[in-house]
Each structure stands twice: as C-alpha cells, then as structure tokens.
Image: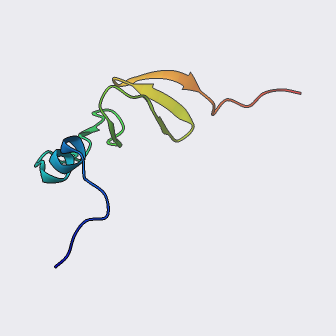
Amino acid sequence: MAHPKRKISKTRRDKRRTHYKASAPKVAVDAVTGEAHLYHRAHWHEGKLYYRGQVLIDNTEEVEA
C-alpha cells in the first residue's frame, strides 16, 4: 500500500483541488492604428507611442547633430 512520506497540508491540498484558473489577458484594438494591445497600456506603432488613440511620444523625427 502506498503511503505519503510527508503529510500534505490542508492549504496545499486545497490549492491542488481548486478550479480557479488564470485567464487570458484581454486585448483591445486601437481605433487609430488598428494595432492590438493590452487595455490601459500604451503601445508603440511605427516609432510612435500611442495611448487611447493619441500620440504621446514621436520618435520618427530626426535629431540634428
């Protein structure tokens, strides 16, 4: 007969038996660029940083040396 070498705690046992699983992150599509991104996160598209359809940072401009 099989016997466990150590007692499994109630917490560890219940963690294994739970039905709670991690869900996939929700993805939004920007109306301006059509780029898929996470909700409430800024995203880069063609050298520009967008948040809620507005450009925050524009790295496409060339810097004069």
Is 53 in front, or is 28? 28
Quadrant where the image shows the C terminus: top right
**What colour scheme has been applied to the protein in the rendered image?**
rainbow
- Most foreground residue, 11 or 7: 7
- Report x, y in % for residue 54: 40, 21
* Of residues 32 and 28, the one drawn nearer to the viewer in this rendering: 28
Residue at the image point whose x is 53% and y is 32% from the top: 48
11 horizontally vs 38: left or right: left
Residue 6, above or below 10? below
When the figure is inspected, residue 10 is found, relative to residue 52, above or below; the finding is below
| Above-or-below relation of 3 to 46 | below
Q: Quadrant of the N terminus?
A: bottom left
Q: Position of residue 8 (x, y in %)?
A: 25, 52
Question: Where's residue 31, x and y in %?
Answer: 27, 33
Residue 23 position, x and y percent, is 20, 45
Residue 28's quadrant in the figure? top left
The residue at 29%/31% (across/down) is: 39
Q: Residue furthest bottom?
A: 1
Residue, x 33% and y 25% (percent of image)? Answer: 40
Frontmost residue, 45 versus 40? 40
- Furthest toward the right, the residue is 65
- Image quarter of residue 59: top right
